[in-house]
Structures are given as structure tokens and as C-alpha cells.
Image (tube, rainbow, N blue to C red):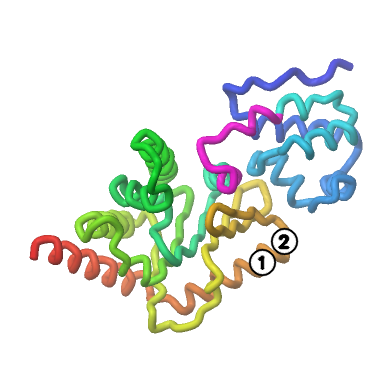
Amino acid sequence: MPGPKNLDPSSSPRALLGAELRVARERAGLTQAELAERLFVSGSFIGQLEAGTRRMHLDVARQIDEILHTDGFFARNCGALAKSRYPNHFAEAAEAEAAATTIREYAPLALPGMLQVEPYASEVFRAYQPTATEDVIDELVRNRLDRAKLLADATKPLLWCVLDEAVLRRVVGSPKITAEALRHIAALIRARRIIVQVLPFSAGAHSSMGGTLKLMTFEDAPPLAYVQGNSIGVLLDDPATVARHSLTYDLLTASALSPTQSLALIESVAEGYAHDEHA
């Protein structure tokens, strides 16, 4: 029986490769859990690969070819998945984000990338890379703003953010730029496109003092958690770990201001920056 044809990189490589993986696995008579056991990964990881919400890396592709006797098909084709506009530590998370039905995010230091306006994003990247050329900064900003296009759909994904009060109080670039950024958030809230809560300083110690947190769910794949630090990020699929991070987020929302109170605070802080700009 002839093997599968090489994938067309102009299509959706992850989705196509995932569909081929499902066919090859079922042809071999293996369940997701059985293939996962041979690869020393979780069953949910195989589910994510087949659903196209996780990237297949070359070392995993080679093992899959060996186990499923696919004559190097997955190793040949996973190269199309290696290209990304995003840094290596964030590329998989960005791909998963684009396929998610719900995204819940805690931002302790800066506005979430998907919610940033161009001047704010530019100032953030300049702070990260003070010696970068204008072309580099412009490309980084374009890629970040492209992520915001996910919000063009009126209903999906559901985006729920908890912003630490420090995010509101830190002036990025200038009071004018920060006011514009916060007004953009307020407009999205008033349009009922996103849900935002502010975690006030008065909340004291809280459940996510270790840093950022992003939780994603999907229609046909297990949920994922993403944690990030300086130039490092980890995408997690272990069910117990994801459940623990989900509890962390629930505790954050319980400690945060209500959406109505949060909107009032965001607009008040934005107005204060606008006043400072004209003072």
C-alpha cells in the first residue's frame, strides 16, 4: 500500500500532520495512550498533536516513524512546522492560542500581548531589546498586532484576563501611550468582547506570585497551560498540572475586583494619565 504523500506547506501543516498521525496510529492498531507510552509522553500530548494544537518536533517525528513504520513521512514533513514568526519559547503557545476556544490569562507586569496597541507594544519591545534596529522592532510589533486579529471574531475565543494593578500603574513610554493602551482595553470590555478583572494591591499575597499564566481550552483536544519567564516559556499538557494551574487562576479571580469595578478602575487610571499628559 503506498504511503501518504508529502504535505503541502501552503495548507495548515499542523492540522494535516495531525490528521495523518491519527490515520497512521489507527492503522497500526494503537490507542493514543499506547502510542504515548512508547514515546514516553502523555496521552493528552498525542491528542494535541492529532488535533493540530501542538507542534511535532523532529525527534518525536522520528520516533513516530519508527513505531508506526511510516518510512520517514513525519520526519520529512515536520520541517514545515518549525517556521514561526515568534520566538522559540513562545511559538508553540502562539499556535495553540490561535486554535483555542477559551483563553484565560494572568498578567503581572504588562498588558497581554494580544491586547496591546502599537505604541505600547513598540515601547515594550524597545525595553526588551534596546539595541535592536527599527526594522526588527517593527517586525516584532507587526507580529504581536497580528495576534490581536483573533479578536476580530465576535465570540471566539473567549478571552478572560486578570491584570495585576501594577500593569495599570506602570507608565510604558509616556502617560499618553499608557492612557491609549488602557482605553483600548476599556473599549473591548464595553464591547463585551473580553472579560477583565484587576487584582488590586490590597489583595496582598496571591496564588500566582510566581509569574504569568495562560490557560487554553479547545473543542477537540485536551487543555493546555503556559507559563513564561524572561525569554523562556513552557507549554504544559499533563492533566494534573493543568488542573492545578486552573485552580490558581480561579483563586486569582476570587481575589480580584469584579469586572464592573475593574472597568471603573481602568478608565479612572487612563483618565489620570490623560490629565497628566495635558497638565
Q: Amino acid at mark 2?
A: Pro
Relative vertical location of residue 179 with respect to residue 119 in this rendering, above or below = below
Q: Which residue is mark 2?
A: 239
Q: Residue placed at 75% from the left, 18% from the top? A: 5
Mark 2: few/some/many CA within 10 Å (<14, 14-19, 20+): some
Viewer-proximal residue, 106 or 110? 110
Q: Nearer the viewer, residue 162 or 91?
A: 91
Tell me, yes or no, if residue 190 can be seen here. no
Q: Is residue 73 magenta?
A: no
In the picture, the quarter occupied by the C terminus is bottom left
Q: Is residue 52 above or below residue 187?
A: above
Could you say where residue 52 lies in the image, as x and y percent from the top left? Answer: 65, 39
Q: Secondary structure at mark 2?
A: helix
Image position of 106 (left or right of 248): left
Residue at far left of view: 279
Residue 71: give x, y in percent of width and height: 86, 23
The answer to whether mark 2 and mark 1 are in CB contact below 8 A is: yes
Q: Nearer the viewer, residue 160 or 210?
A: 210
Q: Where residue 208 is drawn, which disc sits there?
A: none
Give the numbered dot on residue 243: 1
Q: x, y percentage for residue 109?
A: 42, 64
Question: At which x and y percent is residue 93?
Answer: 57, 48
Q: Main secondary structure of the magenta part?
A: helix
CA–CA distance in space, label 2 to label 1: 6 Å
Amino acid type for the residue under numbered disc 1: Ala
Give the residue displayed 32% in from the left and 71% down from the top: 260
Q: Which residues are magenta?
A: 78-92
- Crowding at dot 1, Cα within 10 Å, few <14 / some 14-19 / many 20+, comes out as some
State the residue lying farthest toward the top: 2
Which quarter of the rendering shows the N terminus?
top right
When the figure is inspected, residue 53 is found, relative to residue 113, above or below; the finding is above
Q: Secondary structure at mark 1?
A: helix
